[in-house]
Amino acid sequence: MRIEEAILRRVEMPLKFRFRTSFGETSLKKFLLLELRSGGNAGWGECVAEEGPFYSPETIESASAVVRQFLLPIILERDLASPAEFETLAAPVRGNRMAKAMISCALHALFAEREGVPLARHLGGIRDRIESGVSLGISRTVKETVANVKKHVDEGYRRIKLKIEPGADLDRVTAVRKAFPETVLTVDANGAYTLSDAAHLSKLDAFGLDYIEQPLHHEDLADHAELAKRMSTPICLDESIRSVREVDLAIRLGACRVVNIKVGRVGGFEEAIRIEERCRQAGVPVWCGGMLEAGVGRAHNVALSSRAGFVKPGDISSASRYFEEDIVEPLLETREGWMPVPSGPGLGVQVRRDVLGRVTRAIEEFR
Ligand SMILES: [Mg+2]
C-alpha cells in the first residue's frame, strides 16, 4: 500500500475531572493525532505521549519531532506490504515507542479498512465484547475516594483500580475494601515506592487485591522480584515492560505475575502481541492499560483487548467519563461493565471532523 498523505494534528480536549497520580495532575488532554490516507481510505493513530516526560521519557514535542524527521519518511517513500513492514524499517530508530506506536496503529487501522474487516479481527481478536475496569486518580480524602468508587461500582465496572502513593494508600484501601468487600480491587503506585517500603506494602495483603501495579521504580526488576517474595499480592508491571525482551526477563526473575500492556508503551501492535503471546506461554494474565485516550486510541485499545490473552478487565471505560464530546462516533461506552467491540471495517467508529475542527490546535500535512 502506498501512503499518499499523512496529516499530523495537535489536539486539546478538556477532561471532565482532574486526574491525579503519583506523577502529577492533569485536566486537559493534549495529544498528537495522525491520519494516513491511501486510495480513498483513512487510518487513524493517536499518540499517548504526554506534555511532560513523567510517565515515559517521550513528550508531545519529542514524538512530533521523531515522527516528522525519521518515521514519516519511512512510510511516505515506500509501498508497504503490511503494517509489520513499518516495524522492521523503523527498527534502527531506538526507543521513541509512543511515536512509533501512533504510526503502527494508524497503519493497522488503514489496512483493516482496506481489507473490509474490523480492526479487532485484523489483530487476531476473538471477543465481541470486553470487560471494563476503571482507573481512579488519587482523591483528596478517604471519603472522596469511597464516594468515587461507589459511583463506578454502581455504573457496573468490573474492576476498580485506585492510584496510590506514600501517604495515600492503606487508609484508602482499608475504607474502600470495608465498603465494597466483593469488588475486584487493584492499586497502582506508578513506581512511587522502594524496596525499603516492603513491610508497609505487605500490609496490603490483607485486602484481597487482585494485584499491585508497578510498586517500584521501572528499572528495578530485581527489586520487584525481591518484593514478590515478601508479599502475597501478585505484582503487575506497567512502566517496566517496554518490550518482549523485558517481559521475558521479568517473568524469568519472578518480578511479576500479571502484565499491563499499552500499545504506546511498547511501540506498536506487533510488539504488544508478542508480549501477550510470551505471557500466555508463561501463564501470566495480561490486560490493556489506558492513557486517558480519546476515541481513536480507545478504539485501538478495545480491538487489542479482544485477543484471547487479555483475560483481566482493562483500563477501558466509557468515553463519556472523560470528555463532554469525543472525536469519534458512536461513542465507545461501557454498559453494565462490558464494552462492545466495534464490528465495522477498520477502526469501526467514524472520526467526527466537526469535533476535530474545534479541538485541533495545529495541523501539518505531508505527502
Ligand atoms: Mg499503571
Image (tube, rainbow, N blue to C red):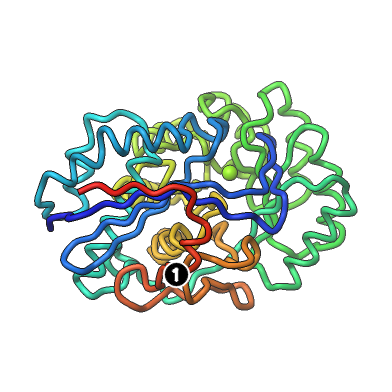
Q: Residue 294's spot in the image, x, y percent? A: 51, 58
Task: Determine crowd level at label 1: few under 14, some 14-19, many 20+ residues with C-alpha closer than 10 A.
Answer: some
Name the residue rendered at 20%, 69% in the picture. Answer: 40
Q: Callout 1: helix, strand or loop?
A: loop
Ligand 1 picture quarter: top right
**In the figure, 58 relative to 33: above or below?**
above
Q: Residue at x 82, y 34 (%)?
A: 167
Instruction: List the single residue furthest toward the top.
Output: 196
Residue at coordinates 57% horizontally, 57% vertically from top-left?
Answer: 315
- Is 39 situated left or right of 260 in this image? left
**In this orientation, which residue lies closer to the viewer: 217 or 277?**
217
Question: Where in the figure is residue 141, as x and y percent of width and height?
Answer: 88, 47
In-front residue for pair 145/101: 101
Relative to residue 359, is residue 331 depicted above or below? below
Disc 1 beta carbon < 8 A from ligand 1?
no
| 69 up-or-down from 4: above or below | above
Query: Looking at the picture, does residue 296 appear above or below residue 349?
Result: above
Residue 87 horizontal/vertical position (percent) = 23, 43
Number of disc labels: 1
Quadrant of residue 243 within the rendered picture: top left
Residue 277 shows in the view: no
Amino acid type for the residue under numbered disc 1: Arg
Q: Quadrant of the N terminus?
A: bottom left
Front-most of residues 161 and 308: 161
Image position of 66 (left or right of 207)? left
Compared across the picture, whether 137 is left or right of 278 comes to right
- Residue tagged by mark 1? 352
Quadrant for residue 199, please give it. Answer: top right
Whether residue 340 appears in this view of the structure is: yes
